[in-house]
Amino acid sequence: MPSHVSKILSQLYDKMFAHFGPQGWWPAETPFEVILGAILTQNTNWGNVEKAITNLKKSGVLNPQALAKIPEAKLALLIRPAGYFNVKAKRVKNFLHFLASEYEGSVEKLCAEEKGVLREKLLGVKGIGPETADSILLYAAKKPVFVIDQYTYRVLTRHFLIEEEADYEGMQDFMMRHLKEEVSHFNEYHAQFVMVGKHFCRKSPRCDECPLKGVNW
């Protein structure tokens, strides 16, 4: 039988889904576009990332081979809307070097790698942390891993499901122990956390209007 925690997590999901509807994440045409988006969305909002991705598409360089060839300075200009563009250009180049050296430049080969091995390798790429690595694993490679972000942390702590001192790995382990290990569910659940975090569970929370009001221990 499901645990009490599993039941609460199920209630949270059902209420978010009923309020926001299916999110259809990740908004991208190819796994490579997902990967770029995961790198570029660090410290910015998705609207800015979309502008950067559009620039890459218009320039005809939204593929690993073309991006590997263009100078870093040119790449930085193209992704300027995403913010921290010089830093992010280096991170994209770091990933492209990794892709070429480990997977012969093939995103398909990368996505076919075993989950644990791929995660460890991704975390070894300078500029890719746990949230970015897990976003690549879940949304590009379709691996069953739960992505943790600031919204997840807020919802879980404010509903007293985890301690405020919980770290990334601890929160991820918590979610994956209490949810069915399924890519589509992890995908949609994380997207729902983002929606409730953006609209209600903000730094200054709007608890009275939140669809999760009343769900507690």
Image: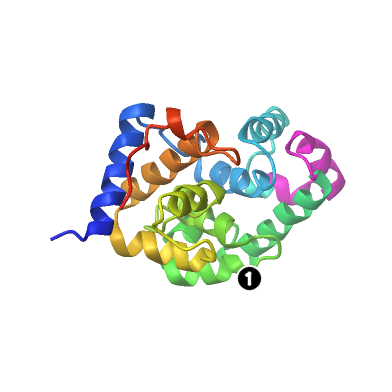
Residue 109 horizontal side relative to residue 61, left or right: left
Which one is in front, 33 or 23?
23
| Residue lying furthest left | 1
Q: Is residue 45 above or below residue 148?
A: above
> Overall secondary structure of the magenta stretch?
helix
Which residue is painted at 42% across and 32% down in the image? 210
* Residue nearer the viewer, 181 or 158: 158
The percent coordinates of residue 71 (x first, y second) are 84, 48
Residue 134 appears in the picture as rendered: yes
- For residue 217, above or below residue 61: below
Q: Quadrant of the N terminus?
A: bottom left
Q: Colour scheme of this structure image?
A: rainbow
Q: State the image quarter where residue 114 is shown.
A: bottom left
Q: Nearer the viewer, residue 32 or 198?
A: 198
Q: Is residue 41 magenta?
A: no
Q: Is residue 29 above or below residue 63?
A: above
In the image, is residue 81 part of the stretch drawn in magenta? yes
Question: Who's the residue at 69% across and 38% down the image?
Answer: 61
Task: Give percent across and percent down for residue 93.
Answer: 73, 55
Classify mark 1: helix, strand or loop.
loop
Report the side of 39 relative to 90 (left or right). Answer: left
Q: Position of residue 102 (x, y in %)?
A: 59, 68
Q: Which residue shows up at 58% across the image and 55% down it? A: 132
Q: Amino acid at mark 1?
A: Gly
Q: State whether residue 180 appears in this view.
A: no
Q: Is 63 placed left or right of 196 in the picture?
A: right
Mark 1 Cα shell of 10 Å, populated few (<14), some (14-19), many (≥20): some
Which residues, given as a range, are shown in magenta? 66-84
Residue ID at (35%, 31%): 22
Q: Specify the farthest residue to the right.
A: 73
* Residue tagged 1: 124
